[in-house]
Image: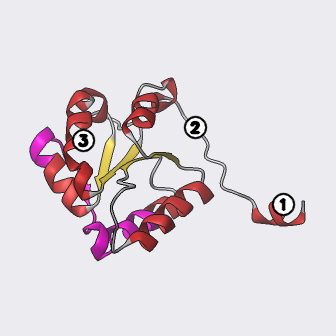
Amino acid sequence: MNKNKNIALVAHDHLKTNIIQWAKKNREELSKHQLYATGTTGSVLIEALNLDLHCFKSGPLGGDQQLGAKIAEGGIDVVFFFIDPLSAHSHDVDVKALIRIAVVHDTAIAINRASADFMIQSPLIHRSYKQRPLNFETTLNA
């Protein structure tokens, strides 16, 4: 079966349970796509969903950067990143860089359950969508 989108799933430690619950609710839809995840999130999702996922390293060990590189290469269409804004993260700089690279490359990114619900239910999840990376020459010369 041809997979529609390349989807990345990530969650901070305190939100792993939330992403598992959300992914179980949306398992049928997620199964239609090629899935990627950072290490720990990926391992808990594989066990919970029994779906194939490509796992990068754990976020603090470089997984956020690996995912960012995949986005920069045009290999990710959608990111679901359940961010914990109330806890300190040793790799906060990497998280900010991941969000920045998603914005620069016009990659859809949901950072909480509400935005994830809207995105997974969007008709665009099954349609072709041309990402429009920021054009800095135009931006800087405007």
Q: Are marks 3 and 2 in contact (CB under 8 Å)?
A: no
Using the rendered view, name the quadrant where residue 24 is placed: top left
The 10 Å Cα crowd at callout 1, few under 14, some 14 to 19, many 20 or more, is few
Between marks 3 and 2 in the image, the one whose residue lies nearer the viewer:
3
Using the rendered view, name the quadrant where residue 86 is placed: bottom left
Which callout, 3 or 2, points at the residue further toward the start of the chain? 3
Give the quarter of the figure containing the C terminus: bottom right
Q: Residue at 50% across / 59% down in the picture?
A: 99
Q: Residue at 81% across / 66% down in the picture?
A: 137
Extreme-front residue of the structure: 86
Q: Is the residue 87 above or below the residue 110 in the image?
A: below
The 10 Å Cα crowd at callout 3, few under 14, some 14 to 19, many 20 or more, is some
- Asked whether residue 50 appears in the rendered view, the answer is no
Instruction: Pick the residue in front: 83 or 33.
Output: 83
Give the quarter of the figure containing the N terminus: top left
Q: Gap between marks 2 and 1, in whole Å?
A: 22 Å
Circle 1 residue: 138
**Which mark is on residue 18?**
3
Between marks 3 and 1 in the image, the one whose residue lies nearer the viewer:
3
Residue segment shown in magenta: 46-69
Which callout, 2 or 1, points at the residue further toward the start of the chain? 2
Using the rendered view, name the quadrant where residue 54 is placed: bottom left
| Amino acid at circle 3 | Asn
| Amino acid at circle 2 | Tyr
Per the image, label 1 sits on a secondary structure element best described as helix
- Asked whether residue 100 appears in the rendered view, the answer is yes
**Which mark is on residue 129?**
2
List x then y, in percent, for residue 56: 28, 64
